[in-house]
Amino acid sequence: MIKTFIDKLLGKSTPGTSGGKPHFGKREEVPASVHGINPELVDRRAAEVVATLKQAGFEAYIVGGAVRDLLLGLRPKDFDVATNATPEQVKGLFRRAFIIGKRFRIVHVVHGRGREHEVIEVSTFRAYLDNAAAGQVAGNEKTSKAQLSGMQHAVDASGRVLRDNVWGPQDEDATRRDFTVNAMYYDPVSQIVVDYHKGLQDAKKKTLRMIGDPATRYREDPVRIIRAVRFAAKLSPLGFSIDAKTAAPLVQSQALLAEVPQSRMFDEMLKLLQTGHAVATIEQLRKLGMATGIYPLLDVAVERADSAFVKAALVDTDRRVQENKPVAPSFLLACVLWEDVRKGWEDRLARREHTLPALQDAIDEVFERRIGDVSGRGKLAADMREIWVMQPRFEKRVGSTPFGMVMQPRFRAGFDFMRLRADVGEVEEALAEWWQDFQSADDERREDLMDQAREEQKARQKAQPVVKRVARGAAGTPSAPSSATSAPQKPPRAAGPAVQGEADAGDAAGFAPEGGAPKKRRRRRRKPGADAGGGEGGGPAATAGE
């Protein structure tokens, strides 16, 4: 205690902070008989990368979260390797290896091709450097690109590390990692775990503890704030919790995230929501007092996490990840923002706008208000839009529309979205079941399904009241409508803007023109092949009479 007080007076600091040489920890080599890692859980390709590096005379270990998961008896999804070989030396040992990154230069060693390929990330041991002695830039990564190009170690005015590419020994590399349970090294050849910061003990105690002073480590890299939440969410089912000293500065440090590039924040938000622990992440954010202020889209997700539709989407995303099925950010974000789109759509329909143009306008408004520069990520925005625009078209089950729908590349995402809507009662369950049958049926069965839909449509039309308009000034009509009310009135709308044809159902129901003669429903005699647009244009062409 006295030594700590003297160190503070002299301007020294605790491990992990700037201002004094940190304690790098004592190297402990833990044998297999103690750590109990099952070698069968180790990815063969990661072990081959380690073996290749060692055969070339370098040190090499599996490192980070993979070691933590192995110690817990879990099969890691990703394997990272750390070595004392430089990126150039690593690249020279493998046929398919690529140096990436500027802030942290690493090597991606690629195994396999196509969907079966796997990337093993290889990083070089980094030196622990006092950030007070680092090159300092006034701006950020975007505004100081030219200045940063020749720097190996640089920080901005707030102390955030912008470049960290100075190589060093393994003990220093361990100290610059974030949590003790992520700072262990495993050699699959000798099966020894190397531990410098009591990570094995913390793993047994189920504690997430930051190496060094937490507030300083968050300032060095604010994304560690998000990583703390993500690891707590992932490991909470196993009984892990964040150490009190590690959790204390989290809320106060949130303001540092404003300096992180938006593209990186967007990617970190997706990691929170799409790594199989979305529901637990929402719970952790609320528990830690961080429900707002990290990222605007994440704020919306947390706010709506208890609504039936968003909760169903989060649960479904977690399930798919656990089953090793692919998940798309466009789908989850479309679910989170659907409430905004639907409300804007309903407001426009109430003003008697046509169905699809009204939906398109509502989507444009949401992109402008909620997504901002993320909408510039072309494919993401296009996929979200396509999922939303597909929803009213699911109501059109006659003509050529169903055949065109199932051929669209994003049909499955649109259907899954509609399926969730049915699960929460937003659309009829029978509609989801019809499309489930149609997409997997043969041609004969599809014709039967369309006949069934056509009969249901006729039954609904017969049940609708026939409203006739009478010419103005006709005798014996004391309640004749005025010119202000002479336009056809729509029948009552079902819950939400779910039915595509309802905007023009008046024509199909037999409104009479001003001359008093019944309006002929000529469109009913059109052949299905005449509907080449598939209802995609919206408006009057997409009538219930088709």
Image (cartoon, rainbow, N blue to C red):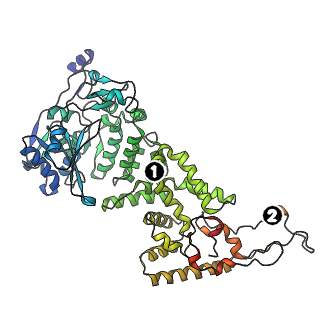
**Residue drawn at 64 percent across, 78 percent down:** 460
Residue drawn at point x = 33 percent, y = 46 percent: 230
Q: Is residue 538 above or below residue 97?
A: below
Can you give x and y, in whole percent of width and height, for residue 309 in the image?
49, 59
Residue drawn at x 66%, y 77% as measured from the top left: 523
Q: Is residue 546 visible?
A: yes
For the image, the number of numbered tags is 2
Question: At which x and y percent is residue 541?
Answer: 63, 69
Residue tagged 2: 485
For disc 1, the marked residue is 378
Distance Cα–Cα, label 2 vs label 1: 44 Å
Q: Which mark is residue 70?
A: none
Amino acid type indicated by mark 1 = Gly
Image position, residue 433 (x, y; %): 47, 74
Instruction: Identify the element where label 1 is drawn.
Output: helix
- For the N terminus, which image quadrant? top left
Q: 490 or 411, which is in the foreground?
A: 411
Q: Is residue 205 left or right of residue 144?
A: left
Q: Which of the two marks, 2 or 1, is nearer to us in this view?
A: 1
Residue 197 falls in which quadrant of the image? top left
Residue at the extreme right:
475
Q: Examine the rendered structure and indicate whether residue 311 appears above or below residue 20.
A: below
